[in-house]
Every structure is written in C-alpha cells, then in structure tokens.
Image (cartoon, helix red, strand yellow):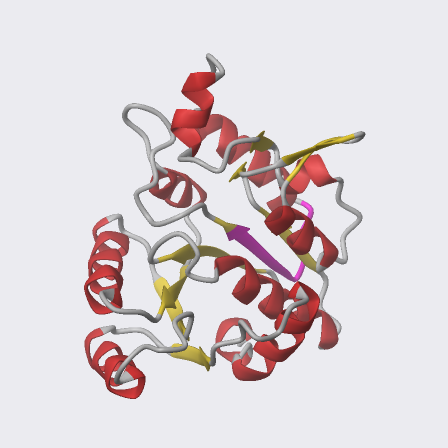
C-alpha cells in the first residue's frame, strides 16, 4: 500500500502541520512506514546545521524513513512572509518544477503513507505566474483540506474546494479544525460545510490551544481523525 496526499489549508494557521503530524502518527501506530515533505517553509531560524523550520521538524519527527531535514524541507526562508516575496528579497526565484523534483525524491522512496504539506492557502504564489497549487497538480495526488474553523471559514473553504476541483484534483477529505475557541455556532458551520463539500469529513478537532507542547497536541489530535478513510 502506498498512499500519498497533499495537505492544504484554507489559510495560514489553519492547522495543517498539526493535522498532518497526527495523521502520520496514527499511520505509524498501525505499523505503516511514513514520510513527509514541506517543500517550502518561511519562518525559519538559523542553527549550526542550517535553517530550520519548526513545522518541518515536527513532520520529520513523524517519519519512519531515515530522511534528512533538507529532504523534508528543501526550500527554507528566515522571514515568516509569503515565500515568493522572501525569495525575491534574496534575489532568488522558486520554480514548481524544482519543487516537484525535490518532492518526488521523497515520494519515490515508497513509504506506505506520505504527506506533502503546502504553505498557507491553495493559491500561495511560487513566482510571478506559478502557485503551490501547480505543485499539487504536478504531483497529481489527492488533497486533504484542513479548514480552520473561525468566522469566514465557510467562504474560504468553499472557494478552496472549488479551486481544487478546477485544478482537476481529487479532494480525498477534509478536517474541521476548531482554531477559534470563541467561534459562535461551530456545529452549525460544520454542518453547512458537510452539506456543501462533496468529500468525506475525516474528523472534527476541538480547540487544543490550551495544550502547550506540539507533540501533546498531535497525540490528542490523532484521536479525532479517521485515518481509515485515507488508507482503505
């Protein structure tokens, strides 16, 4: 079995990394080999080993394949800004074909369960004409959408679902991640999305902001996700 998915979000901070790590952790618990790629990460710190991004390191910690950090996160920027702007400020130009090559290198290692995490929302620019959606299209793998449940999320989610369909990709499922602890009518909002999104709801994750450690949040998050929907 080789299952591969592109993890997209409705926006920045929708909870892509937490959900991706939780899915990987659950796959590991079932004895599956796992791998992950975050091709582009903006918001890194300088270390003796080079630039490091916390989200990418979390993903790496859930990989059973012996991957190097640079395989999981091949393109890294210090500033937590739009990646194409970060690249421009350094006089660089990202290209989807290069990102595809980096990502394919991990996919070819043949883990049972591999996730590719995007950055921000679906149409985040890579350069003046390409977006990270073009990477998902180039990889031709199904998408799992993480919906950050907060005011305005219905519009963001439905527009993203439409864009995924327009790009010719399969939406394998979606996750309702309750990032706003004070959101009104959460249940009604989720019901609205269930009615309008023609894909399986993989899980509803409650607000976990009171849990400080990322590893603890991942452990709790995985209990709310139905991995069988993605592995069967």
Residue shown at the point (38%, 70%) measured from the top left: 174
Q: Is residue 163 above or below residue 218?
A: above
Would residue 138 appear left or right of 53 to someone viewing this image? left
Name the residue: 72% across, 62% down.
33
Residue drawn 38% across and 31% down? 126
Q: Residue furthest top?
A: 91
The x and y percentages for residue 41 are: 53, 39
23 on left or right of 11: right
Compared with residue 47, is residue 33 higher up or lower down, i.e. above or below? below
Above or below — where is 220 with respect to 14? Answer: below
- From the top left corner, tell me how far across and down residue 97 is, in percent: 45, 28
Q: Quadrant of residue 44?
A: top right
The stretch in magenta equals 109-116
- Residue at point 70%, 51% (across, down): 60
The one of 96 and 60 positioned closer to us in this rendering: 60
What is the x, y in percent for residue 144? 42, 63
Question: Residue 169: x, y in percent?
Answer: 32, 54
Quadrant where the image shows the N terminus: bottom right
Q: Quadrant of residue 212?
A: bottom right
189 vs 1, left or right, is: left
Q: Is residue 109 left or right of residue 84?
A: right
């Amino acid at each position: 079995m080789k299952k591969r998915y592109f993890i997209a979000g409705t926006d920045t901070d929708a909870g892509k990394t937490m959900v991706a790590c939780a899915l990987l952790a659950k796959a590991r618990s079932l004895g599956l080999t796992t791998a992950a790629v975050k091709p582009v990460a903006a918001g890194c710190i300088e270390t003796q080993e080079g630039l490091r991004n916390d989200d990418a390191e979390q993903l790496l910690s859930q990989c059973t394949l012996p991957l190097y950090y640079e395989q999981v996160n091949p393109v890294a920027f210090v500033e937590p800004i739009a990646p194409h702007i970060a690249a421009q400020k350094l006089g660089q130009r990202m290209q989807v074909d290069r990102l595809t090559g980096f990502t394919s290198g991990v996919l070819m290692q043949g883990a049972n369960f591999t996730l590719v995490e995007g950055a921000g929302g679906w149409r985040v620019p890579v350069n003046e004409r390409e977006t990270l959606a073009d990477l998902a299209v180039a990889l031709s793998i199904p998408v799992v959408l993480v919906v950050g449940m907060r005011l305005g999320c219905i519009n963001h989610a439905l527009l993203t679902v439409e864009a995924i369909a327009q790009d010719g990709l399969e939406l394998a499922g979606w996750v309702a991640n309750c990032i706003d602890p004070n959101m009104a009518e959460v249940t009604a909002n989720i019901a609205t999305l269930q009615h309008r999104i023609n894909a399986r709801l993989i899980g509803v994750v409650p607000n976990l902001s009171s849990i400080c450690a990322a590893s603890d949040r991942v452990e709790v998050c995985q209990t709310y996700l139905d991995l069988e929907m993605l592995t069967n």
